[in-house]
Image (cartoon, helix red, strand yellow):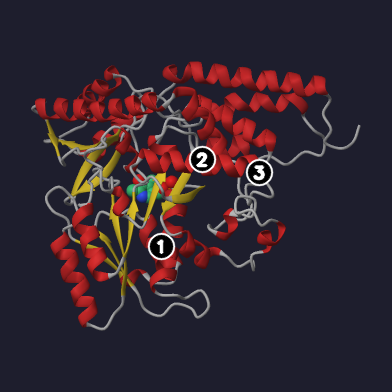
Amino acid sequence: MRALEISNQDLSRLADEAMDLARTYWASLDDRPAYPSTSGKETTELFSRPWAEEGRGRDVLKDFELIAARARPSAGRFFAYVFGSGEPVGALGELLASVLNQNVASWRSAPAATSIEHAVVGWLAQAVGCAGFTGSLCGGGSAANLMALAMAREAKLPANETGVRGGVIYASEQVHMSIPKAVALIGIGRANLRLIPVDDQFRMRPDALQVAIAADRAAGRNPIAIVATVGTIVSGAIDPLPEIADIAGREGLWLHVDGAYGVLAALALPQQLNSLALADSLSLDAHKWLYQPLDCGCLLHRHPDIARKTFSHSDDYVGLLSQDPTEGFAFFEESFELSRRFRALKLWLSLQYHGRRAFRDAIAEDLRHARLLAEAVEAHPELELLAPVPLSAVCFRHRAKDNRAILRRVNARGRVYLSNATVRDQFALRACFVNHRTTDGNVLEIVSEVIAAAGEVND
Ligand SMILES: *Cc1c(COP(=O)(O)O)cnc(C)c1O
């Protein structure tokens, strides 16, 4: 046998065993603790081993349960961060995408996969009211935000050839950390990111935005872009897009919407989120509120010309191979990566397997779960809601006890897992709902676990 060759029989047994592991794992999710009990010492000891000279064969699959027992499960009782639930049809899509092993760099290198990616990007654009936008899939919201701001900079302050001189970007003080990171990476400098104050619902204040832009212009600086957030990471706040888009239009600024968490709620809330198409660019995360396995971000925009200006460095060499615009298309000329996975296949399979209504219903259910928790918190004399709940993130606290200690106790008890946030300088317990496995009972368990943990914490 040649090196690395596997007989059909061995491959078939390996595949069966791997699928059995997957099946058993999915069936066990509900019985697993919301967070594994392990330590850095334990995982290091278990998994730092030399790469052996001789192969272990099928034995390697024995490691799966070692790993699974120390992995954060995508169970319905995990409420920390914005952590999607890893829909199994999507996971099988990942497997099949790897089997095909396409490099979705261009139509020439991956004909079907390129057309499928265009199709699912079109579905996503349409689902959030941005029909006609173009774009591509990427690793996540951070990558999408970085590409969007690189495009904004190249549109308003061309610098690919000359390097960056000046430029100011605006976002609310609730902005996700991926935005300052992107502002730094594109050479604008974090000192030139203005963090605009928010109103009592944690939304960017357009009046303060206008004042900040005027102050920068008066000082001779060069405003280039505004980042509005649809679904802030702390409380799910939605910046007022029509007012912000007005300002962007008047001032000639690029409007990027960071919708990594919240934009897909448009499936269930089309009326509330009906102005997303005012954006020049918009990022969303299918691995969050579309329940897909990691990773699957998406950048949508309506400026393919600027995407090419920003990302094309190839002298159009695929264009030489075909006159046909579809066959001459290359993702690497309109986005950052060259070698790209076939991320679109999991969406293609999962979104069609379940159909649009099922995703709309799952998102509506998450929104209902957030309201259910908010109501239970408000009805409980010992608890207090700390922020409005426009989407599915709920920030609350115990009125009397040390909430840091409560959080540690809650998570150590293992039934539910929460994260924390800072709301107006207060330490908040935070639960976020982006999980199709969560039940009403799981939601109410948050309250009973917090109260039980509070009982275990000294005053
Ligand atoms: C999650 C998130 C991001 C970053 O997305 P990744 O997929 O984690 O890179 C950016 N902005 C917001 C609002 C987010 O919720």
Q: Which mark is residue 149?
A: 1
| SS state under label 2 | helix
Q: In the displayed image of the protein, which residue is found farthest to the left? A: 381
Compute the Cα span from label 1 to label 2: 24 Å
Q: Which mark is residue 178?
A: none
State the image coordinates of residue 459 (x, y, percent, origin top left): 15, 35
| SS state under label 3 | helix
Picture layout, residue 420 above or below residue 60 = below
Q: In the displayed image of the protein, which residue is found farthest to the right? A: 1
Picture layout, residue 2 above or below residue 373 = below
| SS state under label 1 | helix
**In this rendering, would 429 be left or right of 12?**
left
Q: Residue 34 occupies which quadrant of the picture?
A: top left
**Residue under label 3:** 111
Q: Earlier in the sequence, mark 3 or mark 1?
A: 3
Q: Are marks 3 and 2 in contact (CB under 8 Å)?
A: no
State the image coordinates of residue 128 (x, y, percent, origin top left): 34, 41
Q: In the displayed image of the protein, which residue is found farthest to the front? A: 323
